[in-house]
Image: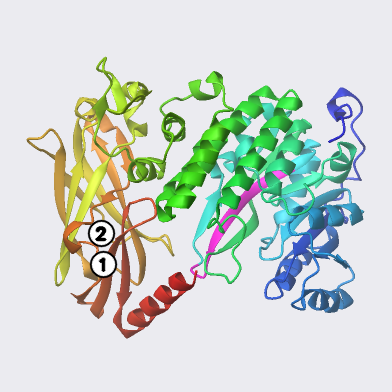
Amino acid sequence: MPPHPPHPSQGPRAPHAPHDTHAPQVGIVVIGYNDAAHVTTAVRSAVAQGPVVREVVAVDDCSTDGSAELLTRLAATEPRVKVIRRRVNSGGCGSPRNTGLDRVTSPYVMFLDSDDALPPGAVDALLAAARGASADVASGLCVRRELPGGREVPWQAALYAAHAVLERPAQRPRLVHDTLCVNKLYRTDFLRGHGIRFPEGRFLYEDFVFAARVLAAGPRVALVPDRVYIWHVRRFADRLSISLDRAGITNWQARTEASRLAYDILLGAGQKELARAARAKFLDHELRLYARELGLHDPPYQHAWWAHTRAYLAEYDASDWAHNPAAPGRLIGRVVLSSPAPRDLPRLRDLASRPARLLPPYAHAPDGSPAWSADLPEVTLEPLLTRPVRLLPLAVDAELRPRARAALLRLRLHELYGRVAHAGPEALEVEWRCRETGRATARRTTVALTPSADGHWSAETTVHWAAFEAGTWELRLRVRFRGGAHREVTAHALSGAGLLRRRAVVSTRHAVVLVQPYATHSGALALRVAPGLRGVMSVVQGRLRRLLH
């Protein structure tokens, strides 16, 4: 990467085009490879942004499925669309984005992937923020849309709660958590003047490196709360996206390498606070994400993952571990560093869940202080003694015993080194929420917590099958403490004695319903509910999809 020229704040800022928000100002680079089913939809969502878009540069990375021909026909009817077909497939996303960036003639540029879309008004919102603040980068809210269900989950929503203008990225270190390049508008001269490009070739997680190069250049940043990007997540697609295709160890190796490069770029640019935030982000996000799924892989993968992660975390220094030492990612990292081989995977999985759960046993070091386990006393849990109760990794066990028309839900809240008793647990609020739609059942239950003789707390409630529609339902809990404090938790699914077996039950709404309690990837209790004959068919189809993928 070439040395950075002086930042515009150190001298006259590059002149902007006249403040006509409807004048063609923005070029949108759309990249695709063998995505004929979606690429024209993505391009049309860019064109539909209106006259503010001067050009849509569609880069086909040497597809063989007719994508380029579809784009060429679209360009024949829309003069703003320019089609570029690469002669050799790059194997990644960085090279085609660089190709498109080289062809853009507009003052501002955005990036769009072929299987995603821009919502109406996205470019107007970003351009208005960039122009109004004389910003080099304007960034907005991306939503992950799960398909085919359509459930939407905001990405890094806390960053985009309100309009903001940052003179430099270090004012908000959490910017390093948003490594997406697609929910942002960039001043083209800013990127070119600083030599900011994507890694070439088959480089996975190229956006990690690109985002670090952008932040390292110290741009003036405008943030907007508007939805500016729709990220489509197709978990059952024939060809999984890079972020979803985590079957092999090479994906984890690529992710750690991209994270290492991002850190080096920020540190090399003198952005020490951002570099430290990048390492913290790895622990809080990447490490937790992959640790949560580690138990799903075979032993060779687990041993390779563990060894690679230990080597990477050995690069961290004391200051990287000192901040927020009770955070789940840091505890997971310390366990990995302290053990030469994989261990305690179910417990690590629950600790990596969101919100975190720390399952028993709760051991002590020889000096009496809280510790991870008797044979890993060097992994101290002492910071939990001062962590606010609303952030404690509380463990609640859930046992669901289905009956004909309802089920008995038994819940057990574990003590945690005296912190729970000191806070005074009073009740549990119980709610079931549909993963596909985000809707909750009409009935939300509050049950009292009763202390047990063994120092824990228990509660019971009835689950009525008539309250559920078709879908996947996740159990959400809120522990209420004396004085008004509370903690949102999920429940660890107990699986003994056939508790998680699929059953046909009676429902006053649907006659017969197939119900399957199960443990999610993070070990939490959830329900698959399929009413009637149509529900039976959906269960069969879902099982086939899971077997195939």
Image x and y of residue 420, in percent: 23, 30
Q: Which mark is residue 467?
A: 1
Outermost left residue: 453
User: Closer to the camera, 384 or 468?
Assistant: 384
Image quadrant in which you'd find residue 58: bottom right
What residue span does the magenta drawing correspond to?
A: 138-149
Image x and y of residue 305, in percent: 51, 45
232 shown above or below 10: below
Asked if residue 298 shows in the view, the reply is yes
Asked if residue 26 shows in the view, the reply is no
**Dot 1: within a 10 Å radius of its alpha carbon, few (fewer than 14), some, or many (20 or more) residues?**
some
Image quadrant in which you'd find residue 390: top left
User: Closer to the camera, 379 or 114?
Assistant: 379
Magenta region includes residue 140: yes
User: Closer to the camera, 283 or 256?
Assistant: 256
Residue position marked by numbered label 2 in the rendering:
443
Residue at (47% x, 51% y) in the render: 300
Contact between marks 2 and 1 (CB within 8 A): the answer is yes
195 shown above or below 119: above
